[in-house]
Image (cartoon, rainbow, N blue to C red):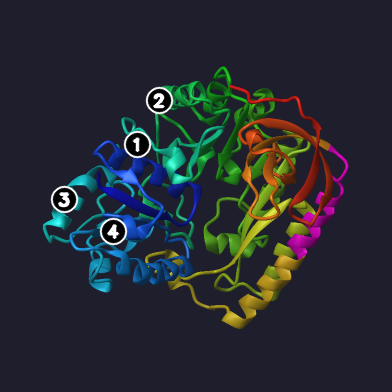
Amino acid sequence: MPRIYIETYGCQMNVSDSALVLGLLRAQGYVRTDDPAEADVLLVNTCAVRDHAEQRVLGRMGVLKGFKRAGGVLGVVGCMAQRLGPALLEQVPQVDLVIGPDGYRGLPELIARARQGERAADVRFQPWEHYEDVPAAREAAGGGGGASAFVTVQRGCDYRCTFCIVPMTRGPERSRKLADVVREVEGLVARGTTEVTLLGQTVNSYHDGEHDFADLLRAVGGVAGMRRLRFTSPYPTDFSERVLAAMAQTPPVCEHVHLPVQSGSNRVLRRMLRRYTRERYLEVAAALRHAVPGIALTTDIIVGFPGETEQDFEETVSLVREVRFDDAYTFKYSLRDGTPAVKLKDRVPEAVAGERLERLIAVVRRVARAKNVALVGTTHEVLVEGKAKRGGLLQARTRGNKVALLDGPDEWIGTYRRVRLTGTTGSTFTSWPVAQELAVVG
């Protein structure tokens, strides 16, 4: 049987798409391998959000081409493939095929053509494509399986933030029908999944023509056997009163929201074309905390955006202190060809952006550590996700998205336990089981 090797870079959406690719090729008789030297087809599922991600992929392609055997196929799929298109075939001569996120159904045909010596690219947008009939191979792709799974409910984005390449790589926003999402979740639960993460570029703007995100939360959260429901990434101003009420009234919805802010300066937010002010963002954060007491908030922040002054940066730092985020993903601005920000003047010098990033990270860590230290001694339900990277321990996660390490047998993986948080490094907790009788649910 032909063997496929796939590497995934970037967001949870790419992990979910890799599961689709594996599921589609499995139906054609392919089996997955973890060893590129064994593969007949090597694929890299790519990210285009930052230049660093693309450079990393190009470097990796230089390694993977050494594993390409006679008659084998090397392909690039995903957002970087969509952005560069046929130019990628010229840039890396060993690449045989390039396919964007809407073209995965064409993979078997392009692979067959590649084996005949034809190199091709397919980066057409398909606004109808949701891959409803493709059985995703989630566990093989690292996209869940077992107790947890990702479920894509929305593709593309209609928001045109000046820094963001996503509208150019993922196309216009479109949402799946609510009934189709519920049917998929019911199938997952029937196979033992108890935690689902709903995925979308601006997931809380979901609307299938009849139902909004509040309806979706209630419907998915109402599936018998669902224990935890998460979603990412939302847009701050799409948290309507209906959505807040659904979050508060749907027990499986977890007490964590990743709420990207990007900047704490109104001047920078305007240049980014974000559709809120600092004040409005603070109102949304307060509304979430009122609706879901104890909710953990995390965020994304960009420093060094064109025109950002020291005062703008200080406003971002003060926002971090005011909101008291549980964590933040922080980045230096990365210029992306094709985005409106390319035309903005007043570029921030690299050294200045790097120094601001270091200062911001220090503040984020101090705030997060203080919040986590306050949780030591409290008791939480955790889902045991797997083995920790070191120490022979297990890794588990609270409903508030806190990672806890605990000592226990491998049989606990996929089960829910009650633990007491006994210490913290500032980001990760140590813990001790306090109710070892909890077993697998579902």
Q: Secondary structure at mark 2?
A: helix
Instruction: Name the residue that disc number 2 marks.
Output: 180
Query: Which quarter of the figure is the N terminus placed in?
Result: top left
How far is the residue under mark 1 from the one under mark 4? Answer: 22 Å
Label 2 crowd bin: few (<14), some (14–19), many (20+), radius 10 Å:
few
Mark positioned earlier in the residue sequence (2 or 4): 4
How far is the residue under mark 3 from the one under mark 2? Answer: 31 Å
Instruction: Name the residue that disc number 3 marks.
Output: 112
Q: Identify the image quadrant of residue 397.
A: top right
Q: Secondary structure at mark 1?
A: loop
The disc labelled 4 sits on which kind of residue?
Gly
Q: Position of residue 52 (x, y in %)?
A: 48, 69
Instruction: Name the residue that disc number 4 marks.
Output: 75
Mark positioned earlier in the residue sequence (1 or 3): 3
Instruction: Name the residue that disc number 1 marks.
Output: 130
Mark positioned earlier in the residue sequence (3 or 4): 4
Q: Nearer the viewer, mark 1 or mark 4?
A: 4
The disc labelled 1 sits on which kind of residue?
His
> Dots 3 and 4: beta carbons under 8 Å?
no
Query: Which stretch is magenta?
Result: 363-378
Q: Nearer the viewer, mark 3 or mark 2?
A: 3
Mark positioned earlier in the residue sequence (2 or 1): 1
